[in-house]
Structures are given as structure tokens and as C-alpha cells.
Image (cartoon, rainbow, N blue to C red):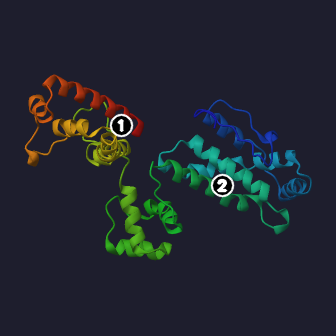
Amino acid sequence: MPERNSITVAPSRAIGAAMALPALGNLDAYISAVHRMPMLTAQQETELATRLRDNDDVDAARELVLSHLRLVVSIARQYLGYGLPHADLIQEGNLGLMKAVKRFDPTRGVRLVSFAMHWIRAEIHEYVLRNWRLVKLATTKAQRKLFFNLRSNKPDHHTMTTDQVDALAEKLNVRGADVVEMETRMGGHDLALEGYPDDESSFAPIAYLQAPNAEPERVIAERDRSRMQGEGIEQALATLDERSRRIVETRWLHDDSDGGTKTLHELGAEFGVSAERIRQIEAKALQKMKVALADFA
């Protein structure tokens, strides 16, 4: 896409680079240039369209496009109310014009200007819907119709009354519920998820939409930790002899209902060895379990 302050007619794959119009510096210069392009008579238009259809004549396609660029400028101007750059609207309209030229059949008895209007508007509509909001507002046929007609048919900027909703729904052949829904959607505005860094008092959605306990990394970590504490510990304990397992379970995995943690001296008395020997057995057992847990993980 060209820079915002300049416009070129993007070449269509089907028509080729020969249709490209050189950059003219800025939007005003471009509009002035396209209005100086000569218009075609019905006979000239038919001859050029026939050459394009029968011979894939790129020069003929280029003349058809260039002679109708003023039409794109006129249609694009009708969509300035959506806050999108005029240059971008024209660019998208030019793409629609080139699609129309490619599909135009001169034997139908219809002038290209009438045929191309549909394609130009369709391309601009798609661009507006893609870029007017971060969240797409219109997806169904009824919603698209309302999107491009609601504001121009509202009597004022206030919320529509029931009678006004019913009247507009009947005029556009849509449901009243669709009118109310689209009015609500268009009345809203985009909101930054994380707020603005310079505004310490802002209360952005990230503050109340986040769910720390549902973060994928935390969920996976909690699951792995739970599995390690269950299957992992049991598998590591299985690698120990009966005395070492008894010492580790009593010292580290005790249940308060079993009388609580035992000291090294108490365990020494139980097994008839010194407290130092119990400490050595414990250290060796814990190291062996550490290796087993690493293998499990």
C-alpha cells in the first residue's frame, strides 16, 4: 500500500503492471490529475472492453481504468464519515474498479460506470468493516446493511425510540432487534486492554478481566507439581530400602495424626543407631530420591 500522502493505482494481477498510475505527490494532486483524464464515449468503451475480453489487451484495460478513476474518488468521498483516510478509501475503490474492468462484458448493453459502482462500493465496504474498529461489527447481511445506513437514517444523535426503530427496520427490511443491536455496537468505542502508561489512575480492562489462576503456564505448572507430589514422590520412595523410606516419611512426609515429626535421636533409638547415622541415611536417601524425581520429570 502506498504512503498516506500519495496514491497510486495498485496493479491487478490479472491486468498487470502496465495499469499503474505514477505517484503524483499528494492526494490533491492525484484528484486533480484523475479529473483531467478524458472520458470515453460508449463506442470507445465497447471497443476497449472487446479488446480486453478477446485479446487480454492490457493497454485497453489501462484506458478503461484511468477513464473511471474520477468515479472512485466520488464514491470514496461518501465514506469519509467513518474517520478513515480518504487516500486509503480511494486505493481500495481502485482495486474494486480493476476487478470490475476485468469482469466487464461489453455485449450486455450496460455502461462500465454502472457496472463498476457495485465493485467499487463492495471493496470500500470491506475496507471500512476491517478497519473502522478493532472488533468487527458487521458479519451478517442485515448487520452490514445497517452499518452503512444507520447513521444517515437516524433523525438525531440520541438513542432511537421504539417507533423510530420500527420505522427504520421496515425501511431497510430488517428486524427491529437488529437495529437496536447495531445502534448499541456503533455507539460504543474501542478501549485499550492495558490502559495508558502515562495515566496511573486509569482502570483498564486488564485489571478486571485477567484470571491469574487460568493462565496456561500456571495451569500446567500446577498440574506438573501435583503430579510430582503424588506419582513422583511415590515412585522415588519405591527406590529406597525399608529403613530409609521409614526415616524419610517420618522426617518429611509425616501426618500430624501419626504423632508429628520425629527427631534424629528418636529415630536413632528406634533403629538402634546413633543420631549421626540416621542423618547420614537421611541425606543419602534424599539424594537418591532427587535423582529419581529428576528422571520422573
Q: Is residue 198 visible?
A: no
Q: Could you tell whether 123 is left or right of 17 in the image?
A: left
Image point (78%, 59%), residue name: 103
Q: Which residue has dot 1 on it? A: 293
Q: Pick whichever, 6 or 16, lies toward us.
A: 16
Q: Which residue has dot 2 on it? A: 120
Could you tell me the amino acid type at mark 1?
Leu
3D distance between C-alphas at marks 1 and 2:
66 Å
Q: 185 above or below 233?
A: below
Image point (36%, 61%), residue name: 184
Q: Pick whichever, 160 or 250, lies toward us.
A: 250
Q: Which mark is residue 118?
A: none
Q: Secondary structure at mark 2?
A: helix
Residue furthest to the front in view is 272
Could you tell me the amino acid type at mark 2?
Ile
The percent position of residue 189, horizontal first and vertical second, equals 37, 50
Q: Pick whichever, 24 or 102, lies toward us.
A: 102
Q: 233 above or below 74?
A: above
Residue furthest to the top in view is 276
Q: Residues within 10 Å of mark 2 (few under 14, many from 20)?
A: many
